[in-house]
Image (cartoon, rainbow, N blue to C red):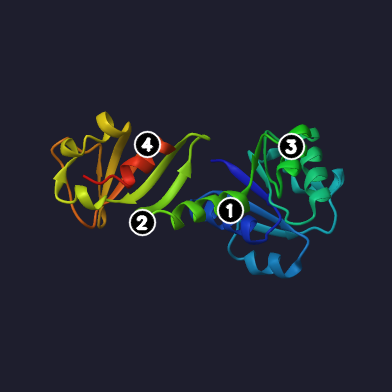
Amino acid sequence: MKQFAIFGLGRFGTSVAVTLTKMGYDVLGIDISEDRVNDLGDVLTQAVKVDSIDENVLKSLGIRNFDVVVVAIGKDIQSSILITLMLKEFGVKKVVAKAQTDLHGKVLERVGADKVVYPERDMGIKVAQALVSNNIMDLIKLSPEHSLVEMAVPPDFINKSLEKSKARQKFGVSILAIRRGSDIIISPEPGQVMLEKDILVVIGKNKNLQKFETFDF
């Protein structure tokens, strides 16, 4: 089973750490704040207070034995860069680092981060897209041009079959599943009828998803 270490237990770091723990993984949380460490002491596999990071500290944590290390430090950009650099020099297999800005992200990539995430920016994009859409409930960007979305059934398709919607032929999107209450219909048949309270799981190009979501007969 994979082991994870999280540097920085602010909102983002805590969310990642708690989610991984609930999924059954071993998680080590690391933060400079004693209060944050104490708050998560009984939640994570282990939580430790560390005032400064150097090679001896990394050795004492056994950090190179972790499969993935997340650098989720907030406003201290210098610390996030230095820790990312040290982790890669120390031989950590995969380092995921949180960036505040595009420039910060570029520096993290230069010093060896295997993946850079922009939680504030990405959440802003999701919120903006949700605000201009009546139907989209959740969105996962798969690439700059493609997304996977959870959306309500477009009003004109309620009580109509997937075949009638011509989702793939007309709009270039694929309906992967239908969530109906606590049930999930995986790879629904063409004759499957979409009901008013169904949630569709749809994949496609962003522009095609928008056309499908706003389609009017």
Q: Disc 2 on helix, strand or loop?
A: loop
Looking at marks 2 and 3 on the same chain, the residue that comes earlier in the sequence is marked by 3
Q: Quick check: 208 left or right of 40?
A: left
Tag 4 residue? 208
Q: Disc 1 on helix, strand or loop?
A: helix
> What amino acid is labelled 2 in the image?
Asn
Q: Which mark is residue 106?
A: 3
Q: Is residue 31 above or below residue 38?
A: above
Q: 15 or 159, which lies in front?
A: 159
> What amino acid is labelled 3 in the image?
Lys
**Which is closer to the viewer, label 2 or label 1?**
2
> What amino acid is labelled 1 in the image?
Val
Looking at marks 4 and 3 on the same chain, the residue that comes earlier in the sequence is marked by 3
Q: At x 84% / y 59%, what residue is drawn?
A: 51
Looking at marks 1 and 4 on the same chain, the residue that comes earlier in the sequence is marked by 1
**Residue 204 location, quadrant:** top left
Instruction: Give neighbour class at mark 3: few <14, some 14-19, many 20+ (Cα, 10 Å).
Output: few
